[in-house]
Image (tube, helix red, strand yellow):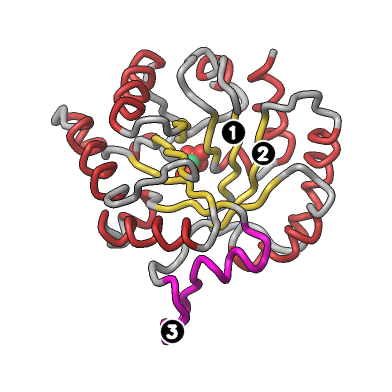
């Protein structure tokens, strides 16, 4: 990998509590001693842990992201929802948007577009997830699907400097299956051509074993890591092996 920045983004999903945050002590000391200034490490815990994690990481270079937000950039009567400026106020610098687990619950491309706009307006950087399902892959329409997700998701967004795209094949998330390097390479090239100038990450079953294969893809700017990010040792191993 020969990129300017290499991102390692931990997506904790709906896991973790105050006690779990102690497990980050090892990651914090690892990062402190990591002699690399082109690495960005971002933890995206559940919203309940943003503030305590932000306090804990006050003197660390590890940054914090949220996992979703409401599309409105205003306050309002939306029970159970959190807007992007509320996330910013508790220390989030990034937000994951368009994750397939939310798309599967009904989030569509237009809503994701609103969320991206409101997050950028609030000063957050966006980790914009796209990816095809297994049925779409089998039908050979992956590029068509990604193309639509990108065009609508990024509609009327001129300044794309605060956006990173995470290519996450839906069939790969949590399944232990990963595409061939040549497939990821081709898709990342396609995404970069379509969304000019945007960094592209790979996500889906990244772990401390397959990282030895995945790290060989030279047009990827880093990884979005779910399950394997919940154990600090695995997460550290992924980073170490990427550079070995
Ligand atoms: P996974 O999740 O690494 O557990 O497959 C990735 C993600 O959903 O972002």
Q: Earlier in the sequence, mark 2 or mark 3?
A: 2
Q: Residues within 10 Å of mark 3 (few under 14, many from 20)?
A: few
* Above-or-below relation of 45 to 144: below
Residue 72: image location, x then y, percent: 40, 72
Residue 100: image location, x then y, percent: 36, 49
Disc 1, ligand 1: is the CB inside 8 Å? no
| Disc 2 + disc 1, Cβ < 8 Å | yes
Disc 3, ligand 1: is the CB inside 8 Å? no
Question: Could you say whether the residue bearing mark 1 is in a helix, strand or loop?
Answer: strand
How much space separates mark 2 and mark 3, taking CA atoms? 33 Å
How much space separates mark 1 and mark 3, taking CA atoms? 34 Å
Q: Earlier in the sequence, mark 1 or mark 3?
A: 1
Question: Could you say whether the residue bearing mark 3 is in a helix, strand or loop?
Answer: loop
Magenta range is 73-92
| Disc 2 + disc 3, Cβ < 8 Å | no
In depth, the one of 93 and 102 nearer the eye is 93
| Residue 76 image label | 3
Residue 44: image location, x then y, percent: 60, 52
Residue 29 as seen in the image, left or right of residue 63: right
Question: Could you say whether the residue bearing mark 2 is in a helix, strand or loop?
Answer: strand
* Above-or-below relation of 70 to 189: below
Which residue corresponds to mark 1? 7
> Which residue does the image show at 32% across and 39% down from the upper left?
131
The quadrant in which the C terminus is found is top right
| Disc 1 + disc 3, Cβ < 8 Å | no
The quadrant in which the N terminus is found is top right
Magenta stretch holds residue 105: no
Residue 49 as seen in the image, left or right of residue 47: right
Q: Residues within 10 Å of mark 2 (few under 14, many from 20)?
A: some
> Which residue does the image show at 23% across and 37% down from the upper left?
147
| Residue 41 image label | 2
Magenta stretch holds residue 86: yes
């Amino acid at each position: 990998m020969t990129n300017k920045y290499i991102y390692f983004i931990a997506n904790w999903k709906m896991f973790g509590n105050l006690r779990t945050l102690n497990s980050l002590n090892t990651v914090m000391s690892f990062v402190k001693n990591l002699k690399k200034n082109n690495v960005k490490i971002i933890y995206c815990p559940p919203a309940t842990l943003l503030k305590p994690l932000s306090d804990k990481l006050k003197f660390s270079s590890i940054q914090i992201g949220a996992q979703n937000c409401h599309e409105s950039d205003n306050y309002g009567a939306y029970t159970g929802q959190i807007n992007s400026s509320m996330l910013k106020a508790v220390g989030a610098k990034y937000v994951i948007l368009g994750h397939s687990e939310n798309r599967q619950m009904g989030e569509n491309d237009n809503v994701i577009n609103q969320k991206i706009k409101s997050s950028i307006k609030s000063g957050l950087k966006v980790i914009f997830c796209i990816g095809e399902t297994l049925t779409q892959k089998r039908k050979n329409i992956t590029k068509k699907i990604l193309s639509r997700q990108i065009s609508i998701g990024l509609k009327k967004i001129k300044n794309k400097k605060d956006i990173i795209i995470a290519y996450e094949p839906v069939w790969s998330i949590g399944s232990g299956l990963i595409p061939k390097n040549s497939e990821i390479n081709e898709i990342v090239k396609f995404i970069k051509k379509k969304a000019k100038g945007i960094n592209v990450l790979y996500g889906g079953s990244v772990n401390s074993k397959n990282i030895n294969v995945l790290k060989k893809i030279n047009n990827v700017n880093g990884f979005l890591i779910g399950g394997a990010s919940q154990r600090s040792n695995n997460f550290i191993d992924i980073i170490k092996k990427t550079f070995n």
